[in-house]
Image (cartoon, rainbow, N blue to C red):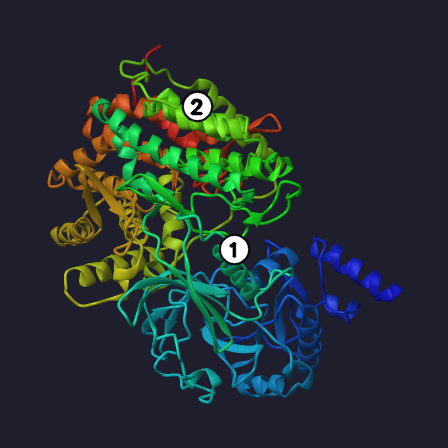
């Protein structure tokens, strides 16, 4: 137990850092406090013990791993070591985030990296050797760090070569300044060609004998990958296809390990063997400390994918009933199977759109996740366990177990049509979710009987409600919105502006002093700064703040794209998201004041545009859409990285060149938005506001007033993405967890679009 002065010291740390630290080194003192710094989101706490700041922008860093049982012990060891050797280090100081990390729930890039040590380049090898020689560290366990290389046979010491500072430029260069690759893009250990492996001997390099993996079962597809374990589709040596799950050692959430949870899944599936809508266990085995479970392959698509592919079925009156009958059969099958489980007193637990697969051929479903499933639950109280966010509200955990299942199923059924249930993350009452769903149902003319089903299960989650769904019948009782007169939403604009200006007054001393600059073309091509600059330009901020060096870098980046896209040479540029290319084109237009000076410039821009149209365009049922990346299977409608962004670039080019080359596809894209489902958010960068901006731009540049009806309809849908908090109206962010006031994802973006629409479109009084 800490003494009195130790407690005072810790209290002072909490005051200095501006947050209450959940844990900290045991032997910290007042002198150490002068060395403390933290990042703005309170994730890391750093001790700057090194006398000299590292000058190199790239090099080796050391990561120290831990487990949920020993992280405090390891922190004390590393704190004392780094303090004695005058080495800067940081650690994850937020206990909640650390538990997520050590249980494998974080990204591949962060999992296991409890402590990061920053040695001077010339000291890297000696520091690793000293750490390895620490007897108190040698026997402790840590979780595996997927992106790093282990030092020899250590359980806790890992290292990697990468960026050493917080610069947004993540490019790795050779000694001559030539770009090699972008750090953090590939989740594996890699070295640039001019760096030799510092420690060639490593226990992971020795291929262990495998009786099952790669012998009996050959992985053919990676379905899901995380540090704590992955899911693969495998082919057996007799030609059958199965699902293979693995759990790595030492990952734990504090209650149970990843291996224990996968073993529990096996036991539960064996108890559910009489139900034909779960995977069946084939076998399990342990190899090299990893636990593996082989299950039968369940065919089907996730509910999210089913929704994305099939929502267009509601686009025309002739398709409404056929589509609705199919969805109703799927819903009834869900209900029948849940009734069968409840009859045996089985609580499914975590019901979400992610763990139900839809077989589109016969309109049936299968459940594929039983981690939270419990048996004989009638006399049990179950309230605290993991549920997938977005499929339960604040009242769910207070219900009896079987009623919890039924209510969650209501939200899952809602997700067959739209992502309304995602709003539960910011409004756990369910009011925003239900309101959005009802509005959505009107827009897409979903039959009333289907709309009522999830509402019944959510509001009255009883077995009788569940059984009543089996008797639901359909009729074409939908109302068309054709001919509706739309008025400009003055009240929405006023309330958004009121909230925005009140928020600005609360932070009146916080001035926007961010400056974006580029020093090289790589700065433009391989960082996200160009995306931020694009948004600033679209926000209509001062176009003249860029330095001449930055403008030159943008022009050179444009030339690099031309060289890449006009040749058949493979380039890492091809793996970049569409958002980078759209942003570079827009920033090129703005930086050069929409002035194409030469015929060569015009040819260059068309080379880039033609490449994007050829490689990112997807035509589906007559709708032209664009993928976020060449490998993506999903069409993105957004202005930051999808169809609206392409439309904006094409319109800017038409405006500055006077060319009619792309007129046909411009019109096709614009009117194609009539058949695209409501986007997930209302923000500018990745939501409805940005799509409306692109359509208003179309209206301005082409003077085609036939598009006005679509724009007005979308304008009158914006309110669906807002929420009242403390009597102020906010735009809900794209992650459904926050509200904010900014341009990209908050009030300001929607305000700018509404103001532009008010000026450009003719509104009925």
Going from N to C along the chain, the mark reached first, 1 or 2, is 1
- Residue 716 visible in the picture: no
> Circle 1: is it few (<14), some (14-19), or many (20+) Cα within 10 Å?
some
Up/down of 419 relative to 628, above or below: above
Label 2: element kind: helix
485 or 400, nearer to the observer: 400
Residue furthest top as drawn: 765
Q: Which residue lies at the image location 48% right of the left edge and 66% below the top edge? A: 227
Q: Give coordinates of residue 275: x percent, y percent.
A: 43, 48
Q: Give coordinates of residue 241: x percent, y percent.
A: 30, 63
> Between tags 1 and 2, which lies in front?
1
Q: Give coordinates of residue 578: x percent, y percent.
A: 29, 52
Q: Which residue lies at the image location 18% right of the left edge and 63% below the top edge? A: 563
Q: Give coordinates of residue 739: x percent, y percent.
A: 53, 38
- Horizontal side of 199 relative to 691 (left or right) equals right
**Quadrant of the drawing holding the N terminus:** bottom right
423 or 360, nearer to the observer: 360
- Residue 588 visible in the picture: yes
- Horizontal side of 703 relative to 477 (left or right) equals left
Q: Are marks 1 and 2 in contact (CB under 8 Å)?
A: no
**Quadrant of the drawing holding the C terminus:** top left
Residue identifier under label 1:
268
Q: Which residue lies at the image location 14% right of the left edge and 51% below the top edge? A: 598
Residue furthest right as drawn: 4
Q: Tell me which corner region of the image, top left, top right, bottom left or bottom right, holds residue 430.
A: top right
Label 1: element kind: helix
Residue identifier under label 2:
452
- Horizontal side of 31 relative to 214 (left or right) equals right
């Amino acid at each position: 137990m800490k003494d009195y002065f130790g407690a005072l010291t810790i209290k002072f740390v909490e005051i200095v850092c501006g947050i209450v630290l959940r844990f900290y080194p045991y032997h910290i003192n007042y002198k150490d406090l002068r060395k403390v710094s933290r990042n703005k989101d309170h994730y890391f706490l750093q001790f700057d013990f090194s006398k000299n700041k590292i000058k190199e922008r790239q090099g080796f860093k050391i990561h120290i791993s831990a487990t949920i049982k020993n992280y405090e012990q390891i922190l004390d060891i590393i704190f004392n070591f780094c303090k004695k050797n005058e080495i800067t280090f940081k650690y994850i100081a937020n206990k909640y985030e650390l538990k997520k990390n050590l249980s494998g729930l974080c990204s591949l890039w962060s999992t296991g990296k409890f402590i990061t040590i920053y040695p001077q380049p010339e000291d890297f090898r000696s520091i690793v050797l000293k750490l390895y020689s620490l007897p108190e560290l040698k026997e402790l366990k840590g979780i595996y760090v997927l992106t790093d290389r282990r030092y020899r046979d250590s359980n806790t010491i890992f290292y990697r070569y990468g960026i050493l500072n917080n610069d947004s430029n993540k490019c790795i260069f050779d000694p001559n300044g030539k770009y090699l690759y972008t750090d953090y893009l590939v989740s594996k250990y890699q070295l640039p060609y001019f760096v030799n492996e510092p420690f060639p001997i490593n226990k992971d390099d020795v291929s262990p004998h495998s009786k099952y993996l790669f012998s009996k079962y050959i992985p053919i597809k990676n379905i899901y990958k995380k540090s704590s374990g992955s899911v693969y589709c495998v082919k057996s040596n007799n030609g059958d296809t199965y699902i293979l799950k693995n759990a790595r050692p030492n990952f734990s959430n504090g209650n149970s390990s990843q291996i224990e949870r996968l073993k529990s899944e096996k036991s539960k599936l064996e108890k559910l063997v009489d139900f034909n809508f779960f995977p069946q266990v084939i076998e399990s085995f342990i190899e090299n400390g990893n636990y593996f479970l082989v299950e039968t392959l369940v065919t089907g698509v996730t509910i999210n994918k089913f929704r994305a592919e099939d929502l267009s079925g509601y686009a025309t009156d002739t398709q409404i009933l056929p589509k609705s009958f199919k969805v109703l059969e799927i819903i009834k099958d869900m209900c029948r199977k849940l009734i069968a489980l409840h009859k045996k007193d089985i609580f499914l637990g975590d019901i979400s759109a992610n763990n139900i697969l839809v077989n589109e051929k016969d309109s049936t479903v299968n459940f594929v996740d039983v981690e939270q499933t419990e048996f004989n639950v009638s006399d049990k109280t179950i309230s605290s366990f993991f549920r997938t966010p977005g499929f339960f509200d604040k009242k769910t955990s207070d219900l009896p177990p079987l009623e919890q299942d039924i209510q969650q199923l209501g939200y899952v059924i809602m997700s067959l049509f739209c992502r309304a249930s995602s709003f539960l993350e910011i409004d756990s009452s369910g009011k925003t979710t239900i309101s959005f769903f009802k509005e959505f149902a009107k827009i897409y003319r979903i039959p009333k009987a289907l709309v009522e089903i999830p509402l019944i299960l959510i509001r009255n989650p009883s077995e009788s409600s569940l059984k009543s769904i089996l008797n639901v019948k359909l009729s074409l009782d939908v109302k068309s919105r054709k001919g509706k007169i739309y008025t400009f939403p003055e009240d929405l604009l006023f309330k958004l502006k009121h909230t925005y200006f009140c928020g600005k007054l609360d932070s009146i001393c916080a001035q926007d002093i961010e400056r974006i600059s580029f020093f090289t073309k790589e700065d433009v091509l391989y960082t996200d700064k160009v995306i931020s600059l694009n948004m600033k330009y679209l926000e209509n901020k001062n176009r003249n703040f860029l330095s001449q060096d930055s403008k030159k870098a943008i022009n050179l980046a444009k030339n690099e794209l031309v060289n890449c896209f006009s040749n058949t040479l493979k380039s890492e540029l091809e793996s970049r998201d569409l958002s980078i290319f759209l942003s570079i084109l827009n920033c090129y237009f703005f930086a050069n004041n929409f002035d194409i000076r030469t015929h060569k410039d015009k040819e260059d821009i068309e080379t880039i545009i033609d490449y994007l149209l050829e490689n990112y365009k997807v035509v589906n049922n007559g709708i032209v859409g664009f993928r976020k990346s060449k490998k993506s299977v999903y069409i993105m409608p957004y202005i930051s990285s999808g169809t609206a962004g392409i439309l904006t670039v094409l319109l800017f080019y038409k405006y500055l060149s006077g060319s009619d080359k792309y007129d046909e596809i411009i019109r096709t894209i614009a009117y194609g938005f009539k058949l695209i489902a409501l986007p997930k958010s209302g923000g500018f960068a990745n939501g409805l506001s940005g799509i409306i901006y692109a359509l208003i731009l179309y209206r301005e540049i082409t003077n085609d007033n036939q598009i006005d009806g679509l724009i007005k309809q979308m304008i009158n849908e914006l309110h669906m993405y807002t929420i009242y908090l403390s009597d102020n109206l906010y735009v809900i962010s794209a992650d459904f967890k926050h509200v904010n006031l900014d341009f990209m994802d908050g009030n300001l973006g929607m305000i700018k679009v509404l103001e532009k629409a008010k000026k450009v479109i003719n509104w009925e009084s």
